[in-house]
Amino acid sequence: MTNVLEPHVYDKSVFINCPFDSAYEPLFHALIFAVHHMNLVPRSALDPSDTGQPRFDKILALIESCKYSIHDISRTEVDPNHGLPRFNVPFELGLDLGCKRYGKRPHKQKTTLILDVERYRYRTFISDIAGFDIEEHNGSVAKVITLVRNWLRHASDSIPFEAPSGATIYTRYQGFQLDLPKTCYDMNWDVENLPFADFSWAAYDWIKNNPL
């Protein structure tokens, strides 16, 4: 397995573009675990590297450095504080699709998974992506894991034919969740407030030390 602490490699990197609020966190954590379990490296704008870099430049650098990307466009609710929805996820999806079309030669091979809570809901708010296969997860952690597993199994040449099923990875994810509090205790981490890098490392380490 690629060491999550090593410098990223384009062909092994997966950009996860999703909401970062507490309501979405269970799905975000499941995405991270599923990507690690498929022997790839999850990347996120929450990664603490290059903290002095402007956010827009950081997003562009992430998109350019990842062959694979997952975009969850399900968060369309209006923010109660200002009465407007947030558009960061569809904006970054557009940047990623633009990179594939106009980027350098390696970027032509970029592969994208677009998720939503319902399969055809996007037609009412981002109809220009019609023609892409939008996968629905219904807010289910188990479904998200299976969708990511199945997509990466066919999208990546590095995934072995005998890769475990989504159901198997979900069962292992439940085991990881049971063990996570002890890991955090041993590391002096707050299990309720784990930064992306710490959660990603914990998932990678658990998978490595609990082989099938």
Image (cartoon, rainbow, N blue to C red):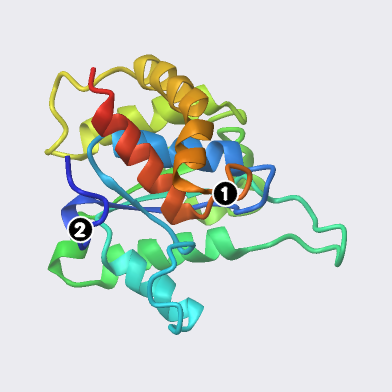
Is 153 displayed left or right of 48 in the figure? left
Quadrant occupied by the N terminus: top left
Residue 81 vertical position relative to residue 208 in the rendered view, above or below: below
Q: Residue at x 54, y 28 (%)?
A: 141
Disc with the residue nearer the chain's start (2 vs 1): 2
The amino acid beneath tag 2 is Glu
Inspect this view and state whether residue 45 appears: yes
Residue 171 vertical position relative to residue 6 in the rendered view, above or below: above
Q: Quadrant of residue 32?
A: top left
Q: Quadrant of residue 208?
A: top left
Q: Residue at x 41, y 80 (%)?
A: 57
Q: How many marks?
A: 2
Q: Dot 2: what SS? A: loop
Residue 87 vertical position relative to residue 28 in the rendered view, above or below: below
Q: Which mark is residue 6?
A: 2
Quadrant occupied by the C terminus: top left
Q: Quadrant of residue 121?
A: top right
The amino acid beneath tag 1 is Ile
